[in-house]
Amino acid sequence: MIALMISGIILSRYVFAFLSISGGMPFARTMHIVASYWGFVLMSMHMGLHWGMIIEITCKLTKKKKLLKVSIWILRAAAAAIAVYGAICFYKENIVSYMFLKNQFAFFDFEQSSVSVFAENIAMMGLWTFVAYYAAKLIQKPLYKKRRQNAL
């Protein structure tokens, strides 16, 4: 986030004109691209780490104490489908090449509709949210069992 802020300030010629920053534009562009893609992935994963809390709040707001098992599996299947579509989009857009600076220039398809772009970005966000949520569950499960055994 700090890299995004610093590179954004350097790239901004109007908002921060009073700072009279000159030079460093190529480095700032490169830093901004790398930091923005990493920021996107890490923020999505951060959301996944808190997804259980979001589910609890949603259940409280809808006054549902317990969902039916069928509903839970339908929601899990939908989440998995979104994650799979997100993985396909992540691969298709070659995001890894931007994250590891294999490609220094962002290429955009201006023929693609804005709805499609948002759908792909939401799906990619869903991918990393899904990965973080279920990775955290896998890690916490043995720890929970261990604490429970120690309590007995």
Image: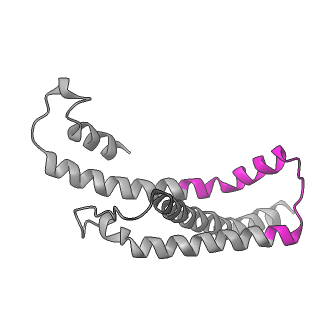
Query: Magenta segment range?
Result: 46-72
Tell me where residue 147 appears, x and y as whole percent.
76, 62
Q: Quadrant of the N terminus?
A: top left
Q: Quadrant of the C terminus?
A: bottom right
In this picture, residue 22 sits left or right of residue 32: left
Residue 98, placed above or below residue 36 = below
Q: Is residue 57 magenta?
A: yes
Q: Is residue 146 magenta?
A: no
Main secondary-structure element of the magenta-colored stretch:
helix
Residue 55, placed above or below residue 19 = below
Front-most of residues 33 and 45: 33
Tell me where residue 128 appears, x and y as whole percent.
53, 64
Which residue lies at the image location 71% right of the left edge and 56% below the top edge? 52
Front-most of residues 6 and 94: 94
In this picture, residue 148 sits left or right of residue 26: right
Residue 137 found in image quarter = bottom right
Residue 152, placed above or below residue 70 = above
Which residue lies at the image location 32% right of the left edge and 62% below the top edge? 108
Front-most of residues 35 and 75: 75
Front-most of residues 12 and 23: 12
Residue 90 found in image quarter = bottom left
Residue furthest to the left: 23
Which residue lies at the image location 33% right of the left edge and 45% below the top edge? 4
In this picture, residue 17 sits left or right of residue 38: left
